[in-house]
């Protein structure tokens, strides 16, 4: 069993909570003779301010009368301290003692001991607090380590021993504790997941209007309806998961934007509904883009790897927006054909950036090659066919491209460079 710290570690500055000055003044003098100072806030309303200014090392609660116990515990609750704490009170109820324990009191005494013995009790309280903190840290680190191992095992197809060795190697390389590395990995994985989900909302905003336009144009109507229903469910599921990954305030605009679009997706759309749905989808796209930027900008050291998750997610959105713009160009008068040319240029630029990025492995390279090949087929079909038939072909090709890009984004999300970034 560990022993308490030696006497050099005795607290030398105390914060005393006691209602009667006549009772605590002699005690303060006795402690001062032992080299300790005693602070005593005169009023409850300046308790926190006094504690912050005086930086005490320990806390002493003293109730000379039983009626003073509950008000002292109220003061302790108001202070919200994590200091080593001793409470001296005779005749208190079990409920009061349990409340004191829950508020962080380590030692309860029935009567006030001599000043030297009181310092030993405070020393014991300090050791108990340190031991509890150390144990909690160890439990927290084990919890984070177990979660991190599980993530690595799932993402990298490792067994438990392999995941643990990878964590240990990262800890040694970064000169951090294993628990710190594990917590960073879990948080990085959560950020990558949140970024992927925000990126999916961008894509789904465009896909839903593309499918609505497909139904209006009579292109594979039944399949478009099935995919539209699946996409609506996916938006709701993403929002539900994001509530565990970002703040409620960050999701308020996204929720409102989704409601505006969702109400326009019922039934077969005429030109007016398509125009309003397209505007609502673009608004939802921008709100999702804003959320993705917030997540990426808050990522700290993992910013560069996470940027590739965001970039790949944007390619998903472009694959759907291209098809949507092609369909709407045939359905809505005055629609700018130049939007399609701009979308083609943006997609090619983003794909080249992904291909040139250093974050890669054999699996990612294979997926990038599949995306490039599907992209070439899409471009060839656009060159060979014009008008409504081209829009229909682009709508079909966009779904194949989306499948490849969804898988690639997930690979970036689970890559070691992102998780250990």
Image: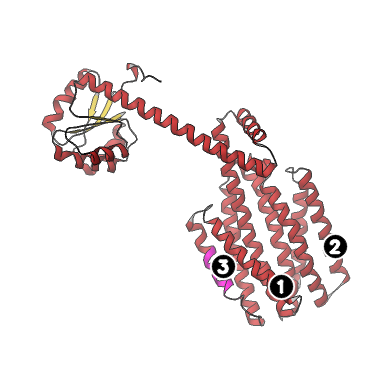
At x 68%, y 75%, the residue is: 212
Q: Nearer the viewer, residue 175 or 342?
A: 175
Per the model, the C-alpha gap separating discs 3 and 1 is 20 Å
Query: Is 276 a magenta residue?
Result: no
User: Which callout, 1 or 2, points to the residue nearer the camera?
Assistant: 1
Q: Secondary structure at mark 2?
A: helix
Instruction: Describe residue 96's horizontal placement relative to residue 411 as left or right.
Output: left
Instruction: Describe residue 109's horizontal placement relative to residue 201 as left or right.
Output: left
Q: Which residues are magenta?
A: 254-264
User: Which callout, 3 or 1, points to the residue nearer the camera?
Assistant: 1
Judging from the image, the colouring scheme is secondary structure
- Assess disc 2: are there few (<14), some (14-19) or many (≥20) residues with their C-alpha within 10 Å of its C-alpha: some
Q: Which residue is mark 2?
A: 377
At x 60%, y 57%, the residue is: 198
**Residue 335 seen in the current view:** no
Q: Which residue is mark 3?
A: 258
- Labels 1 and 2: the sequence-earlier one: 1
Query: Is 258 a magenta residue?
Result: yes
Q: Residue 61's spot in the image, x, y percent?
A: 22, 33
């Amino acid at each position: 069993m560990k022993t308490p710290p030696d006497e050099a570690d005795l607290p030398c500055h105390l914060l005393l909570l006691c209602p009667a000055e006549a009772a605590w003044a002699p005690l303060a003098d006795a402690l001062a003779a032992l080299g300790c100072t005693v602070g005593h806030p005169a009023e409850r309303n300046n308790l926190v301010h006094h504690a912050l200014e005086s930086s005490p090392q320990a806390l002493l609660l003293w109730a000379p009368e039983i009626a003073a116990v509950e008000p002292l515990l109220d003061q302790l609750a108001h202070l919200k301290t994590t200091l080593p704490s001793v409470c001296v009170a005779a005749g208190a109820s079990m409920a009061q003692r349990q409340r004191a324990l829950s508020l962080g009191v380590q030692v309860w005494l029935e009567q006030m001991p001599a000043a030297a013995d009181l310092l030993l009790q405070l020393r014991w309280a300090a050791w108990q607090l340190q031991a509890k903190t150390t144990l909690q840290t160890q439990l927290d680190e084990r919890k984070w380590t177990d979660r991190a191992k599980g993530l690595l095992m799932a993402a990298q197809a490792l067994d438990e021993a392999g995941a643990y060795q990878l964590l240990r190697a990262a800890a040694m390389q970064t000169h951090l504790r294993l628990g710190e590395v594990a917590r960073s990995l879990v948080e990085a994985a959560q950020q990558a997941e949140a970024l992927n989900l925000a990126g999916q909302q961008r894509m789904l905003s465009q896909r839903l209007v593309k499918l609505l336009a497909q139904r209006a144009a009579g292109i594979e109507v039944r399949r478009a309806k099935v995919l539209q229903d699946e996409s609506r469910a996916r938006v709701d599921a993403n929002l539900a998961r994001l509530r565990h990954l970002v703040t409620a305030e960050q999701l308020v605009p996204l929720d409102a934007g989704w409601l505006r679009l969702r109400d326009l997706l019922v039934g077969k759309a005429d030109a007016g509904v398509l125009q309003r749905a397209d505007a609502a989808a673009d608004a939802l796209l921008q709100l999702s883009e804003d959320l993705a930027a917030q997540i990426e900008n808050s990522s700290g050291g993992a910013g560069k790897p996470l940027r590739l998750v965001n970039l790949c997610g944007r390619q998903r959105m472009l694959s759907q927006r291209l098809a949507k713009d092609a369909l709407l160009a045939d359905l809505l008068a005055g629609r700018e054909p130049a939007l399609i040319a701009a979308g083609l240029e943006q997609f090619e630029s983003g794909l080249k950036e992904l291909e040139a990025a250093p974050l890669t492995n054999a699996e990612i390279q294979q997926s990038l090659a599949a995306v490039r090949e599907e992209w070439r087929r899409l471009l060839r079909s656009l060159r060979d066919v014009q008008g409504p038939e081209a829009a229909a072909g682009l709508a079909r090709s966009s779904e194949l491209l989306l499948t490849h890009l969804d898988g690639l984004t997930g690979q970036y999300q689970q890559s070691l460079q992102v998780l250990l970034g």
